[in-house]
Amino acid sequence: MVKDKIQKHHEVVLDTINIEKKNKAPQYQQLYEQLRNLIRQGSLRAGMCLPSSRSLATDLKIARNTVITAYEQLETEGFIETSHGLLARISDLPSMSNTEDLTPLVDLTKNISKRGHSVIIQHHTSGSATTNLFQPGMPDMREFPLALWRRCVTEKLKYQANDVFGYHSFAGHPALREEIASYVETSRGVVCSASQVLVTNGAQSAINLLAELYTDPGDEVLFEDPGYTGAQGAFRSANVKLRPLIVDSKGWHIKNLNKINPKLIYLTPSCQFPLGLTMPIEQRLRLIDYSERKDAWIIEDDFDSEYRFSTKPIPALQGTSHNRVTLYIGSFSKTLFPGLRIGFIVFPGNVTEEISKMNYLLGNIAPLFLQAALAEFMMHGHFAKHLRKMKRIYGQRRALFKGSIDEKMSTWLEQLDKGAGLQTAWQLKNSTSDTALANTAKTHNLKLTPLSGHFLFREPIQGLILGYAGMNEYEIEPAVEKLQKVFIEHFRST
């Protein structure tokens, strides 16, 4: 039994132990007291294994008998357990922490900068590790071909000198840049070569990089309202002035922007987040003309462009702009899974050494072995096959989800989106706060995303952004019934 417990833990490293030869206290006592203190304060936890007496004596440059004596004292007092032929193990003791003796931890919010506060105070709803019910943009990992992915990762973890284990390829793994260029050209109408592709640690990192590269504090950035809060955070962190680009049921309001002189224009034209609209060609051409007159870059965040269910996919704005003014952003968070943290930027010119260096210095580099594995995954057709499968599945789920909402929730909700993306946008018909509604949902262990938090410049629409993709056909109706109960309780109490 003792052996089974010990085998669950590896030998700990004790580099903090310091034996002072000039100290009047015997060496065994110094060692005993330091180990006892580590156990009492919880640094050494139950089941952890201490080094062998021979190993620790060598590390500390002391006699082995000194270590044995310290271990014997600890065992006598019940701090450790020993067994012949096995490493000494920390005993399972009741907590000995005395809260009165603990030094209070530093308040990390005390000295946060004004810029930091401007980012922190903005609304942003994160997901949950325990449930994916209604989480926007969350794909279903249960459908992901993990065995194929594991094979690709394992292959790239085999040692290959100077390939995936070093400090290099800051623009991205060459094979992945080639695959991305081919993919966006054939699927999204993007005009580019591999030399124009920069791989980042997700789409959020891509936005952060562009904000740092192309703006100075105080510069103006034209930003969708309502818009993506992650992008808003990146621009706030860059200390720029956000200016409104209003989006509503009529589209993007491009007129009357002449007084604004933006350095960047941030857009989600293929599937506007959070409203799920698509920018018409007339508005696209007007915006390209405006950006050229203002000498401003367009950041095209091609959010959820792969998932259109009511109409055919719309080509990327980047192709329409003749590759002059557009910085195109994409990622694999929705097509594969968010935890992969691999995104990319397609620049209108070759990625320079300076830009690659900036990507590295800002910590935007995705692990090279994962990049190489993803390239392998795409090269063998697994990515395209998985994407085709998931488009079909998500199309069926969206139809089921909309039908269930229409049947059970039409008293309270009116749909705003136009059938694109892994989430749906709904306006509340009744006079109530979407934030208050989300708070009611928390008591039912549901995490809802209020629509109002994505408005920055004008009176917000009260509504909800509801994800559906993470639920299969058997889970959708029970989930909507649970949502229905939340609404009934909320409106009964208001």
Image: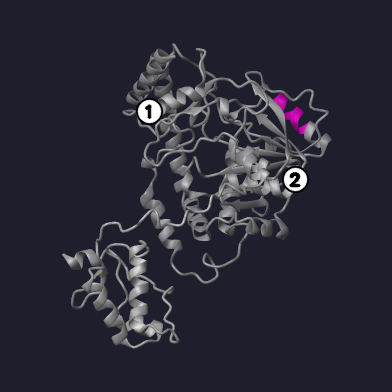
Element assignment for label 1: loop
Does the magenta-highlighted stretch encompass residue 197?
A: no
Q: In which quarter of the image is residue 238?
A: top right
Q: In the rendered view, does 252 fall on the left or right side of 371? A: right
Location of residue 385 with respect to 15 vertically, above or below:
above
Mark 2: few/some/many CA within 10 Å (<14, 14-19, 20+) = some
Marks 2 and 1, the one that precedes in the sequence = 2
Residue at left 57%, top 39%?
Answer: 187
Q: Main secondary structure of the magenta part?
A: helix
Q: In which quarter of the image is the C terminus?
A: top left
Q: Which amino acid type corresponds to the residue marked 2 in the rendered image?
A: Thr
> Residue lying farthest left?
1
Give the percent coordinates (x, y) of residue 339. Answer: 47, 47
Residue marked by disc 2: 215
Kind of residue at disc 1: Thr
x 52%, y 64%: residue: 164
Q: Nearer the viewer, mark 2 or mark 1?
A: 1
Camera-nearest residue between 394 and 227: 227
The answer to whether residue 275 of the structure is visible from this angle is no
Give the extent of the magenta segment: 281-289
In the picture shown, does residue 429 fall above or below 329?
above
The count of marks equals 2
- List x then y, in percent, for residue 95: 30, 56
Q: Quadrant of the N terminus?
A: bottom left
Q: Distance between the residues labelled 2 and 1?
A: 43 Å
Residue 491 visible, this angle: yes
Instruction: Please name the residue shown 52% across and 45% down the image.
Output: 332
Q: What residue did someone put label 1 on?
A: 443
Towards the viewer: 37 or 483: 37
- Residue drawn at x 57%, y 31% is 313
Q: In this view, does 48 lie to the left or right of 305?
A: left
